[in-house]
């Protein structure tokens, strides 16, 4: 027996303009260096360049290619599912720091 997680992928933007287009227009593209796998039809949590969770996006296309400068790149087309609430953003950001980006500094109360 097992379970299927609804969100099993992250989508980290390194470019503020690409993130802005997705959040503002509901559709956008993201370019990544190297060959990457972004499964079409999968939902993912979108993160800002400074690792803050901001939205749920749907991967609509993923194209890996070698460009004219002989560099491997992946272009991903995304649709905005919805923006996250402040509470969702806070929780998912904290989880991502622990699971993907490295643990946050401990805060004493």
Image (cartoon, rainbow, N blue to C red):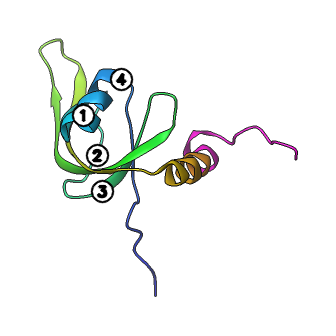
Q: Confirm whether the magenta stretch covers residue 100.
A: yes
Q: Quick one: 52 or 3, which is closer to the camera?
A: 52
3 or 2: tag closer to the N-terminus: 2
CB atoms of marks 3 and 1 within 8 Å: no
Along the horizontal axis of the image, is 18 left or right of 48? Answer: left
CB atoms of marks 4 and 1 within 8 Å: no
Number of the label disc, if any, that sits on residue 37: 2
Frontmost of labels 4 and 3 is 4
Residue 11 image offset from top left, x and y in percent? 37, 42
Residue holding disc 3: 43
Q: Is residue 34 visible?
A: no
Frontmost of labels 3 and 1 is 1
Residue at 26% across, 58% down: 42
Residue 81 image offset from top left, x and y in percent? 26, 53
Q: Confirm whether the magenta stretch covers residue 106.
A: yes
Number of the label disc, if any, that sits on residue 24: 1
Residue at 45% across, 51% down: 85
4 or 3: tag closer to the N-terminus: 4
Along the horizontal axis of the image, is 106 left or right of 77? Answer: right
């Amino acid at each position: 027996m097992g379970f299927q997680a609804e969100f099993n992928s992250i989508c980290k933007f390194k470019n503020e303009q690409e993130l802005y287009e997705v959040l503002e227009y509901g559709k956008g593209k993201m370019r990544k260096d190297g060959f990457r796998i972004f499964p079409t039809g999968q939902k993912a949590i979108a993160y800002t360049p400074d690792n803050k969770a901001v939205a749920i996006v749907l991967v609509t296309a993923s194209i890996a290619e070698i460009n004219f400068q002989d560099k491997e790149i992946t272009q991903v087309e995304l649709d905005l599912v919805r923006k996250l609430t402040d509470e969702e953003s806070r929780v998912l950001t904290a989880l991502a720091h622990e699971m993907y980006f490295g643990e946050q500094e401990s805060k004493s109360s």
